[in-house]
Amino acid sequence: MAESYTGDAYCVKCKEKKNFTGEVKVSDSGRRMAQGICPTCGTKLNRILGKA
């Protein structure tokens, strides 16, 4: 089961922070990152998370 994340991230297209819901992914180097979609413009949002 994929871990979900609810919080805010900066949208480059809207140029402001937006609340989003997305899923947490782990990169090859072990970094955790939340990926979701901006509710306003539909751009992909990314937020790097701390260690678990």
Image (cartoon, grey):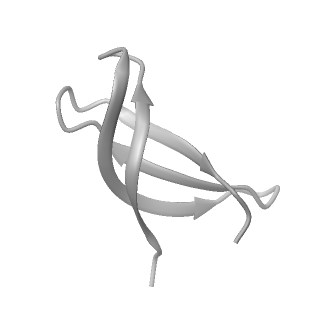
- The residue at the far bottom in this view is 1
Q: Quadrant of the C terminus?
A: bottom right
> Which residue does the image show at 44% across and 29% down from the upper left?
10
Q: Is residue 29 left or right of residue 35?
A: right
Q: Picture coordinates of residue 37 (x, y %)?
A: 30, 42
Q: Picture coordinates of residue 49 (x, y %)?
A: 63, 53
Q: Quadrant of the N terminus?
A: bottom left
Q: Picture coordinates of residue 3 (x, y %)?
A: 47, 74
Residue 29 lies, with reference to residue 40, above or below; the image says below
> Which residue does the image show at 30% across and 48% down from the upper left?
20
- The residue at the far left in this view is 40
- The residue at the far right in this view is 29
The image quarter containing residue 17 is top left
Q: Is residue 15 left or right of residue 34?
A: left
Q: Is residue 47 left or right of residue 21?
A: right
> Which residue does the image show at 23% across and 32% down from the upper left?
42
Q: Picture coordinates of residue 23 (x, y %)?
A: 43, 62
